[in-house]
Image: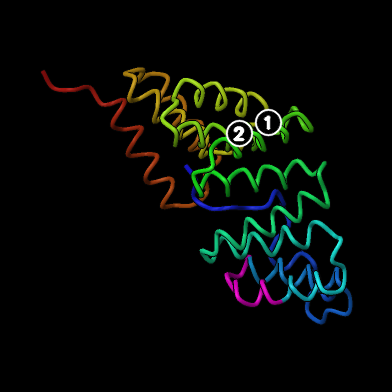
Amino acid sequence: MLIGIVMMSMLSASAFGQDAENPTSAEGWYKRAYDKRHNKDLDGAIADASEAIKLSPKTGKYWLERGISRGNKGDLTGALEDFNQSVQLSPENADGLRIRAMMKARLKDFDGAMEDFGAAIKISPKFSRAFGDRGDTYRQMGKTDLALADYDSALAIDKKYYWFCEARGDILRKQGKLDKAADDYRSALETAKDETVRTRLQKKLTAVTTPTKE
């Protein structure tokens, strides 16, 4: 369920405060780029991240931030270039590897994606998002058994990612395991906040729990 690239951060779009409004340093430009990306101003985010990179070209997270906005804007090749630079500068950043893996998957470089996911998990064995995103990639490749195993691992670590519950439920539903699929849809409903998502999940739950007519 590759729906976009998102950094692992719980900060709100305005979390960086005054320094993000009037940047005076590379970190300030980076923070404002983050804010702009979360406010859907991708051109502004790219421009601000570029300013951060100019001032501090050896800071991996600045390249990562710009790459995310470039990817969200549809510049997949440019995003991958930025992610490559970020990983080169910060090779132990598990989230950077995860994000690059997702981009490689979008570009159909599945071998490269699996290598990056594996490296991220080796660095951070309890990295739920890396397992879940690898599960999404296996699902994209049609390898549902491997996808299920990764969703199991992701959700055993952290159940807050409703989309992994939903994805596992979808596979189980296709396999005819309706009770287990229903459990996953219920779990997803416990954490999903968006009303559109909740409506979709409720429809799926109803579909697997409503008796079929003879």
Q: How many marks?
A: 2
Quadrant position of residue 81: bottom right
The image shows residue 147, relative to residue 29, as above or below, that is: above
Residue 193 percent across, percent down from the top left: 52, 49
Depth check, front residue: 103 or 173: 103
- What stretch of residues is rendered in magenta? 38-47
The answer to the question of whether label 2 and label 1 lie on touching residues, with beta carbons closer than 8 A, is yes
Q: Which residue has dot 2 on it?
A: 114
Quadrant position of residue 120: top right
Q: Amino acid at mark 1?
A: Gly
Q: Tag 2: Cα neighbours inside 10 Å, few (<14), some, or many (≥20)? A: some
Residue depicted at x 65% and y 47%: 99
Residue 156 percent across, percent down from the top left: 63, 23
Q: Is residue 139 left or right of residue 53?
A: left
Residue depicted at x 71% and y 52%: 84
The image shows residue 179, relative to residue 196, as above or below, that is: above
Q: Which residue has dot 1 on it?
A: 118
